[in-house]
Amino acid sequence: MSTPRVAVVTGSNKGIGFAVVRALCKQFTGDVYITARDVGRGQAAVQSLKSEGLNPLFHQLDITDLTSIRTLRDFLKERYGGIDVLINNAGIAFKVHDTTPFGIQAEVTLRTNFFATRDICNEILPIVKPGGRVVNVSSIAGSMALKQCSPELQARFRSDDITEEELVRLMERFVEEAKSGVHTQRGWPNWGYGVSKTGLTVLSRIQARMLQKERPQDGILLNACCPGWVRTDMAGPKATKSPDEGAVTPVYLALLPPGADGPHGEFVSEKQVQAW
């Protein structure tokens, strides 16, 4: 009996991630996993979609916990021999009026949106099967924050030779300078969430280059995307898109047809490649 294909969506018990799972259950041929830190919430999300006649599965995942990531990785290797679709959706944002000191906000936001997502990629990318699709849910906020960086930082973030090590150092530097209160003097915007998504988009570009170099025959496509301004707990009720509308671009990239040679290493919004 052949092994079924498998798709995993991080942070998918609610919001955009939940809507992505709903769409994949309808369009992807294979098993689709909801993941969540909290088992109860994840299982409730599964039951909610089952009541719609869909059939998602659940696996616990806390992307800030390396042991949790590796448990998922080992499960996917054993059960499926790898993974076909990975959508890195899990992320956090502080509310605009949150009084938490900016340095702490920067540290907490980057820990999840950049460093934890990087950990997932480092553990899971090696088991992505040929023809696989990887989608990092970034944000137009990353592009906006990039434009607010100093010319020197912009040049590095846009360069085609920036390494993952250099990017990590830059993200660590932002956190340290934010905690010291000198980040704006050092060329950074006053925007932890925006910088975290700048980092994630650049990371995606680096990962795509690496896949092209190390696995050129495997046809894996990896992109970052912006789902748009979506009515979620994070963005609030005034946002212009429903979660199902926000899921459109991530799902489009996850389901790029077999044999497609692009987009790859791009930042995509409204199903269109955007300038970076």
Image (cartoon, helix red, strand yellow):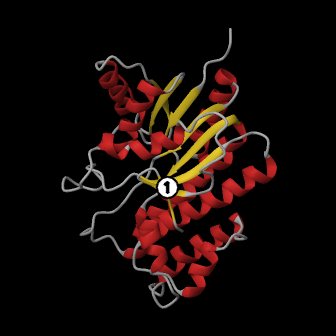
Q: Quadrant of the C terminus?
A: bottom right
Taking depth in this image into account, of 139 and 199 the one nearest to the observer is 139
| Picture coordinates of residue 60, whole percent (x, y) | 49, 33
| Picture coordinates of residue 85, whole percent (x, y) | 58, 36
26 left or right, relative to 244: right
Answer whether residue 106 is visible to the viewer in this image: no
Residue at the spot 54% in from the left edge and 46% down from the top edge: 135
Q: How many marks?
A: 1
Residue 49 drawn above or below residue 138: above
Q: Residue furthest bottom?
A: 185
Q: Residues within 10 Å of mark 1 (few under 14, many from 20)?
A: many
Taking depth in this image into account, of 8 and 71 the one nearest to the observer is 8
Answer whether residue 210 is visible to the viewer in this image: yes
Taking depth in this image into account, of 60 and 55 the one nearest to the observer is 55
What SS does tag 1 mark? strand
Residue 98 drawn above or below residue 190: above
Residue at the spot 55% in from the left edge and 86% down from the top edge: 151
| Residue behind mark 1 | 268
Q: Quadrant of the N terminus?
A: top right
Type of the residue with mark 1: Val
Residue at the spot 51% in from the left edge and 86% down from the top edge: 187
Q: Residue furthest top?
A: 1
| Picture coordinates of residue 68, whole percent (x, y) | 57, 39
Taking depth in this image into account, of 110 and 189 the one nearest to the observer is 189
Residue 2 drawn above or below residue 19: above
| Picture coordinates of residue 171, whole percent (x, y) | 57, 70
